[in-house]
Image (cartoon, helix red, strand yellow):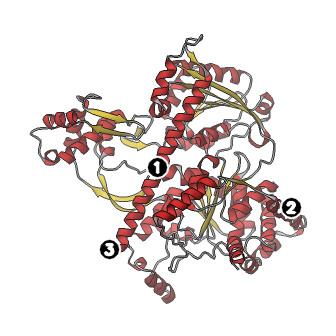
Amino acid sequence: MAVAALRLTACRPWDTRDRAPSALPERRHPKLKWWDRAAIAVLTALKPRITDTGSADRRFAARVVRAGRRLDRLSDDDLRATAASLRPRLLAEGFDGPAAVRAFALTREATRRALGYRHHPVQIMGARRILSGHLTEMATGEGKTATTALAAATAALAGVPVHVVTVNEYLCTRDHDTLLPVYALLGLGSAAIDPEADPAVKRRAWLAPIVHVSGKTLVFEYLRERLGRDDLASPQRRAAARLAGAGARPSMPPALAFAIVDEVDSVLIDEAQTPLIIAAPHRRMSDADCHIALAAARVMTAPEHFRIRRDARRVELTDAGHAALARATEGNGGLWRVPRARAELAGHALSALHLYERDQHYIVTDGKVQIVDEFTGRILGDRQWQAGLHQMVEVKEGLDLSEERRTLAQITYQEFFRRYLWFGGMSGTLAEVARELSRTYDRPLARVPTNRRVRRRLTGTRLYRTERAKIAAIVARARRMSDRGRPVLIGTRSVDVSERIAAALAGTPCRLLNARQDAEEAAIVAEAGHAGRITIATNMAGRGTDIKLTPEARAAGGLHVILTEFHESRRIDRQLMGRAGRQGDPGSCEQIVAVTDPVLTRFAPGLCRAARLIPWPLPRRLPGPCASAIRVVAQARAERRGAQTRMASLRRSEKLAELMAFTGRR
């Protein structure tokens, strides 16, 4: 009996026992005791991190291919009518029976008619796993957008509201525009959510069967909709309003039923470091307070007055620092009379001076400090650092002081996505975070094989003693590859480094893609596969982009990727290197780094100092194996720190939810 119930849930995932008692579909994550958490942690550590697709997936894909052989005889109208007739069968059979095979075959045929190609068996296998709630690892270049169409269309044909969640607005619009003709051939409405659109337009868009939306827009829409809504105060009031047919406007989003998360590790891991917050203007400190704090911080010295914790990105005042601060600010009123507030202001000033660097952590455009996402290289529009740090950076840069913000509502990505009845996702890099995804989101993981043999060559790592020597080597290597007719992609972590490499390449035609050129992303990426083209990019070119090679570039050896700095996560290194050798194309990648790179010095400073002492015949170089050893240690520490931060953020969110429920405000 238990086995039968388990199979029913697997093929009909909307039949979850944890459904919240509300008029709108939403899941209620069960409360766990400490011993439950401990058991889950042990089990996820012991069981395999990620499993491969198996014979059942291959049989399903073969059935889909066979079912589609006669569909080319149908007219477009007959195709739509056949798709519409599947809803009762899909609801009765779920997603593992003949109706699902038929839905996949119809979507595959619609894709052929609209886009000119049919899905490969590996894409069918991946979509089947996503539809059943798996997180799937599909190698870069294996056609994740086309895979999305299979899962999204099948769920929508069953009448399930579908949200396709992307990393950013660019990919949201691009993917929706690509798949719109496929959805239309199947008779399915779809929409892409524009965060700047009129609320009435967004409400109509949210009612579409398939909605494409970026992760941040989705969560912020959810928070704004539930902030101060009397008609959402209780499940009973929501249900009564819906039965009465009046008194409640449509919710945005209307239901958290099924989500397909593209680049799932970026959304659920990288973006989950801090909670998403809706805030209101709030004035706590003045421009004068910031100037006083910065003046005091500039005369302090380390380690006498403060210690810098670069791994935790925190500054700690010593006893001597507290005493020096009190003397430096003696006679000032307001916040400066309160020791704790005084220390907090000084801490923000020291952080602004020593931890947050222009053109790495932020850029200044139009008289504003714009935060740069360290994982994607994109600008985080309308985002601020909290507790006055953002204002301290503004004053450091000589800008007008913006207003601080007081938190009105917040939610973590972990808490939000656990509210979906079920969700699936895909990415090219899941193995490194499989345990955390399984433990936090209770999602099974699967690895999908590639359609063609990977032809990417790894040419090793070169480690240099200084940044200057590293940039010279990168420039020489890029020019050599370009002269051979090969396109070159140079990947950097920061805006500053990308612009320094571009300056060093003066006289050599190249394109630069970072947070300052994000509006030109599509055009720059479209040309990056041309023969002899050199493209310098931050992590913007590492997610969701497809660099298509010209015949001349393919004949010359394909794309050559140069990684110029290790990232805090091995996944991001793999994403960047995965730009080369896609879909059976030739390609190569190499790593040219320096022992002075920020990630290495921040998380493995002792090893970096020791490496500099190694005698080596080449004066500017160090042994390549040293780079691998330092990278392993630094990235392990960085990933452990990130996992701890995400877990702490989730625990605070759960504790806050308990307190709000206790006071009756939830």
From the image, which quarter does the C terminus lie in? bottom left
- Find residue 58 and name its label: none
Query: Dots 3 and 1: beta carbons under 8 Å?
Result: no
Secondary element under disc 3, as helix, strand or loop, is helix
- Find residue 644 and name its label: 1
Relative placement, left or right, of 609 versus 268 is: left
Image position, residue 220 (x, y; %): 46, 61
Relative placement, left or right, of 546 versus 270 is: right
Kindly identify the residue that appears in the image at 46 percent across and 63 percent down: 34
Q: Which residue is mark 2?
A: 62
Secondary element under disc 1, as helix, strand or loop, is helix
In this view, the residue in front, 454 or 315, is 315
Q: Which residue is mark 3?
A: 663
Kindly identify the residue that appears in the image at 83 percent across and 64 percent down: 64
Mark found first going from the N terminus, 3 or 1? 1
Q: Residues within 10 Å of mark 3 (few under 14, many from 20)?
A: few
Judged from this view, the residue extending furthest toward the bottom is 244
Question: Could you tell me if residue 167 is visible in this image?
Answer: no
Kindly identify the residue that appears in the image at 66 percent across and 75 percent down: 159
